[in-house]
Amino acid sequence: MKYDTRMFKLLKNEEIADGIFDWTVENPELAKLCKCGQFVNIKVPGRVLRRPISICDADENTLRLVFQVKGEGTKIMSEMKVGDEVEILAPLGHGFNIEKGKRYCFVGGGIGVPPLLFSAKQADDPMVITGFRNKDLVILQDDFKAVSDKVYLATDDGSAGIHGFVTDVLKERLDEIDEVCACGPIPMLKAVAAVCKDKVKCQVSLEERMGCGIGACLVCACKTKTDEGEAMTHVCKNGPVYDAREVFYE
C-alpha cells in the first residue's frame, strides 16, 4: 500500500443535505493513486487527530470527499473556504475488489453511501441500493443515476423512495446479481450479510473510529474470523473492506 502526505487545495465545499458536506480537493500526485473503497486521513487545523473520510470519487487530479458533521473536527472542516490548503494522508486502506464481467450490487446506508459512487463506476452495469432515515438526508442520487439505470432508494419513514430498508430491495433483486459491495452502519451490514449468505459473495466496508490510519495504533482494532479461529485486525490497514464472512457483527 503506497501512501503519502501532501497539501491539497480545496476547490469546492458545498452542503448537499442537512449537515452533509461535499468537498473537491486537488493534488495530482496522490489523487491518481486512489482506488475505490479507500479513504484519506485529513489534518484538521487546531486538532491533533486526523479525520478519516472515505473517497467518494476520484480522477487524475482531484478527490471528492463527502462527510457528515459529527463533532468539532468535521465542524471545522465544514467551515473551510475554497482556496484553503488541506493536509491529507492518502490513499489508505484496502478497497473493494471489482472484477469485470460480474453483476455487482452496491448497497449503502447513510454516510456509508458516498464511497459506493467511485466503486460503482468500476463495475459493468452496476445496481445501486441506498437507504437513509428520511428524505432530508438523501444524497448522491443523480450521481448514481448517471452511472446506472438500476438505482433504488429506501427510507426508514417512507418520505422518499421505498418505505423500508435496503435489505427489502436486495432480497427482491438477489437473483439479478453475482456480488454485493456494502458500506454503512454495522446493523445494516449484518442484515445485508445475512441476506447474501450462501447465495452471493459479499464485501463489506467497516466504519470505525481511527487514530493514525496506517495500522500503527490500536484504535480501529476489529475482531475477525480466520482459518485458525479469531484474530484482531486493523480496519485502517487490513480493511476497511472485508469479506462479509470474516466479520463479527457486534
Image (cartoon, rainbow, N blue to C red):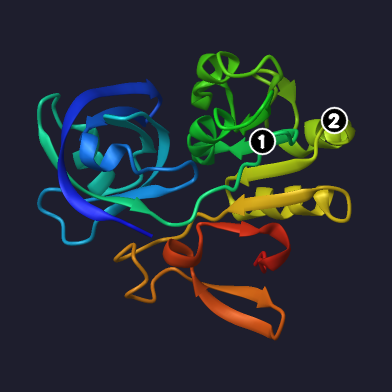
Q: Is residue 91 above or below residue 14?
A: below
Q: Residue at x 49, y 66 (%)?
A: 238
Give the percent coordinates (x, y) of residue 171: 85, 37
Q: Identity of the amino acid at label 1?
A: Lys
Q: Does residue 28 appear to the left or right of 178 in the view shown?
A: left
Residue 147, percent across and down? 58, 18
The residue wearing badge 1 is: 100
Residue 179, image x and y in percent? 75, 43
Per the image, label 2 sits on a secondary structure element best described as helix
Badge 1 marks a residue whose secondary structure is loop
Residue at screen point 61% across, 59% down: 242
* Residue occupying the point 42% across, 62% down: 236
Q: Between 184 and 122, which is closer to the camera in this rendering?
A: 122
Q: Characterize the local packing of mark 2: few (<14), some (14-19) or many (20 or more) Cα atoms within 10 angstroms.
A: few
Q: Is residue 159 above or below residue 90?
A: above
Amino acid type of the residue that numbered disc 2 sits on in the rendered structure = Glu
How busy is the neighbourhood of tag 1: few (under 14 within 10 Å), some, or many (20 plus)? Answer: few
Which residue bears the numbered disc 2? 176
